[in-house]
Amino acid sequence: MPELPEVETVRRGLAPFMEKARIDRVTLNRPDLRFPFPEGFAEALQGRRIDALGRRAKYLLIHVEGGSTVIAHLGMSGSFRIEAEASETPGEFHHPRSKDATHDHVVFDLTGEAGPVRIIYNDPRRFGFMHLWSDHLLDDYPAFQGLGPEPTGNLLSADYLASRFKTRKQPLKGALLDQKIIAGLGNIYVCEAMHRAGLSPETPVGALVDAAGRPKAGLIRLSDDIRAVIAEAIEAGGSSLRDHIQTDGSLGYFQHRFRVYDREGQSCPTPGCAGTVGRIVQAGRSTFFCSQCQT
C-alpha cells in the first residue's frame, strides 16, 4: 500500500492541474473498484469546480464546490495519469506505467486555466476506491474516525506520545502503526524512524515514559525522527515501491536511501556500528532493524 509520502506526492503532482478546474465529464469504465462507486457519482461531479486537493492520512481528498469531497485511496497499484495539451511528462521512468486501457477505470475531463486536461485513474489490481462525502461530515467518514495527529503537523510531539504510551506494554512497532495514535504512518517509515532513534521495535512503549509521565530521551528522539523521515520522503517524492508511481510517471528516490527497510543481511549504516540489519515478523508485518544499535 502507498504510505503517506506517496499520497502527498500524488496530491502535489495533481494540484496544479486539478485545483480551480471545472469538471466537464466523469467517465466510469466499470461499476466498481474495490467497492462500487456511489450511486450518481459521475453526475454529482459534472459541471462543478474543484476547490482544492487535500490529504488525510493515506487518503487523497478532492474538494469540489457545493460542499462535497471525493475520498480516494490508491490501493496497491492505483495511480493518476495527467494528459494535458500544455504539459509534457517529466521524470525518468524507472518503472513502466500501465497504459492498458482496460485498467483506465476513471477519467476526469477538466477545463483549467491552461485549457483542457484529462486525469486518468489507472488501477490494474482494482484495490483502490473512491467515495463521495459531504464536507461537513468528513470527520464521520468511517476511516477518519478516531485518527491520531498527522506526522507532518505540530500536534505530534514527544509529550503527546508520552501521554499515549504511559502504562502501556505494547511493543513500539505496533504502537506506531496504530492509526489512532499517529495517522498515516506505515511500516516503511516506522522501521526507518525507529532505527534513527536507536530504539528496538520490541521495546514496551511504557518504558519510554518516566514515572512522572514525561518522555524519556529516546522518545524525544523518536518524535523528531518520525517527522524528519516523513519530511525527507515527501521531498524525495515518496518511496514508490512496487506498483506505486507518481503522477508524472517517475519513481521517488527515497527508497534508495533506506537505512534498514528491505536491507536484511546488509551492514548497519549507523557510524561505528558493526551490526547487521535483521528481520523479524510482528503482527504479520516485516520489521527491519539492527539489534546492535537499536536497544
Image: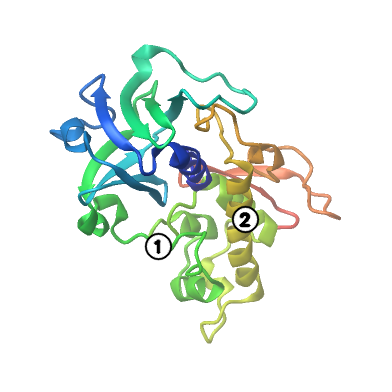
At 31% from the left and 22% from the top, the residue drawn is 105
Q: Number of marks in the image?
A: 2
Q: Is residue 248 above or below residue 259?
A: above
Q: Taking 159 as reference, is 140 above or below it?
A: above
Question: What residue appears at the point 53 percent right and 55 percent down from the top-left corner?
Answer: 173
Question: Which of pointers 1 and 2 lies earlier in the amino acid sequence?
Answer: 1
Seen in the image, is 28 located left or right of residue 115?
left
Instruction: Compute the Cα span from label 1 to label 2.
Output: 18 Å
Q: Within the image, what quadrant is residue 236 found in? A: top right
- Residue on which disc 2 sits: 193
Residue occupying the point 48% across, 47% down? 4
- What kind of residue is marked 1? Gly
| Helix, strand or loop at mark 1 | loop
Q: Position of residue 28 (x, y in %)?
A: 24, 23
Q: Amino acid at mark 2?
A: Ala
Q: Quadrant of the N terminus?
A: top left
